[in-house]
Image (cartoon, rainbow, N blue to C red):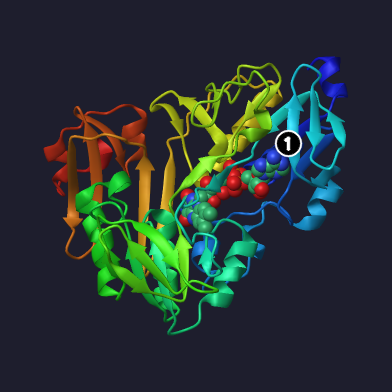
Amino acid sequence: MSEAVTKRRIVIVGAGLAGGTAAKTLREDGWRDRLTLIGEEPGVPFGRPPLSKTYLRGEEDLSGWLVKPDDWYEQHEIERINARVASIDAARRQVRLQSGGVLDYGKLLIATGGRNRRLGVPGADLEGVHQLRTVAECEAIKRAARRGSRAVVVGMGFIGSEVAASLRQLGLQVTAVLRGKASLDAVLGVEMGEVMAGIHRDAGVELIAEDDVVRFEGSRRIERATTKKGRRIECDLAIVAVGIEPSVETIEGTKVAVDNGVLVDSRCRTNVPGIFAAGDVANHLHPVFGRIRVEHYNNAEKQAAAAARSMLGSRAIYRYIHTFWSDQFEHKLEYVGHVRKWDRFVYRGSLGERKFVGFYLHAGRLEAAEAGRLIAKGARPGWRALADEEQDLGLL
Ligand SMILES: Cc1cc2nc3c(=O)[nH]c(=O)nc-3n(C[C@H](O)[C@H](O)[C@H](O)COP(=O)(O)OP(=O)(O)OC[C@H]3O[C@@H](n4cnc5c(N)ncnc54)[C@H](O)[C@@H]3O)c2cc1C
C-alpha cells in the first residue's frame, strides 16, 4: 500500500448496515490508520429487518441486529460523527458537514442508502400518516398501532406486506391499497403474488388491488384515505410504503456518475479515483446479472465488505449471488438470484399449501430461485427437470 494512502484517512458517509460493515471489515482486514464513520441517524449501525417485523410487534429489541456494539467503535479507534454530510469536494478530497466542519479523506465510501418515496397527494403530511425506515418512525407506528384501530397500508411491496402482516398480528383492522394485481407481483410475478395476497386475505387483511390512494383527509389528523376508483377508507393511521430512492444528493456537484444510484464497477469503485460505494445506494456491475441496484440486507452487508477490501487494494470482483428473505405471518419467503424479466415460472411443491420452490427462467436460463449454484454458473437446466420433484437439483 502506498504511503500516501496509509497516511490519509478513510471516510465512510452513511452509518447504516453498509457503512458499519465497511468500518468493521476495514479494521478486521488491517486498516490501522484513521477511520471516520459519519451518519445522520442517531445510534450505532444496525440492520432494519426487525423494524417491520419483530421489533414493530414488540417481540424483540435491536441488540441482536447491531453490526457491532457501541463500545467496539471506540475500542477500534473509529471516529463516529453524528452529522449530515452536505457535500463532497472530490478534487480537494474533502467532505463538508452540514454543521460546517470539513474533513480530509484519502478514500471515501458512499454508503448513504435510500430514503422512502413520498406519496405526493393531498393530506400526505397529516398527523397519522407514517412511513418506515428508521427506529424513530417505527416507534411512531408502534405508538399509533392500538389493537382494534384501523390502518391503511399504501403499497404491498416487501415493507408494505410485512407491516400489514405485523399490524394485523397486533390486532388492527388492516386495509391495503396496491397498484398491481397482487402483492409483490412486480418482483415475484402474478402467480407468486397471488399466493402472497392469499396469505394476507386469509389473515383478514382487506386488499384493494389495481387502485391507488389519491388523497388523505382529516380535520386535524388522518380520518380517511380515498382511492382513484373512489373507495373511501375510514382509518386511524396510514403507512405509506411505496419504495425508496437512492440517496445520492451528497455527491451532486462531483463528477461521480449517477444513474439510479451511484454507478460502481464490479470492485465497488466509482468513476472518480478514491471514491467507492456500497449498499442500497450503489448501482453495481455484476458478472452474472449485469448492472443492478439491490435494496436488501445481504447485499448491503456483503457489498460493504467487498468495498472495504477493494479500498484496501483487493482486486476481487464482487460476484455474490443475491439473496433476500421476507417474513409475513408464519410464512418465510427466501429468494436467490435476480430477475427482472422471465418467460417461464415453474415450481416444485404446492402453491395451494404454500410450500413450494419456484424457479424463474429467462430464455432457458435460470435467473432466480433457491438454487444459487445453478444461477451462478448461468445454468439452463430445462424447466421440466426443474419442476420434476424426482430430479435431484444437485445433479442438474
Ligand atoms: C423496515 C425495513 C425492513 C427491511 N427488511 C428486510 C428484510 O427482511 N430482508 C432484506 O433483505 N432487507 C430488508 N430491508 C432492507 C435493508 O434494510 C436495506 O437493504 C439496508 O438497510 C441497506 O443498508 P444501507 O446501509 O445501504 O442503507 P441505509 O440502511 O439506508 O443506511 C444509510 C444511512 O446513511 C445515512 N445517510 C444518508 N445520507 C447521509 C448524509 N448525507 N450524511 C450522513 N448520513 C447520511 C442515512 O441516515 C442512513 O442511516 C428492510 C428495510 C426496512 C426499511
Q: Percent position (x, y) of residue 393?
A: 25, 41
Question: Which residue extends farthest bottom?
Answer: 148
Image position of 274 (left or right of 123): right
Q: Residue at x 43, y 23 (%)?
A: 287
Looking at the picture, how far across and down is residue 182, in whole percent?
A: 25, 56
Say which residue appears at 71% left-offset and 25% top-offset: 312
State the image coordinates of residue 225 (x, y, percent, origin top left): 39, 67
Q: Which residue is mark 1?
A: 12
| The quarter of the displayed image where residue 90 is located | top right
Please give left or right for residue 350 compared with residue 310 in the image: left
What residue is at 66 percent from the left and 64 percent from the top?
Answer: 63
Which quarter of the picture shows residue 271? top right
Q: Is residue 155 above or below residue 395?
A: below
Q: Nearer the viewer, residue 212 or 105?
A: 212
Q: Which quarter of the rendered picture does the C terminus lie within?
A: top left
Q: Residues within 10 Å of mark 1 (few under 14, many from 20)?
A: many
Amino acid type, mark 1: Ile
Question: Residue drawn at (46%, 52%), measured in percent from left and top?
Answer: 119
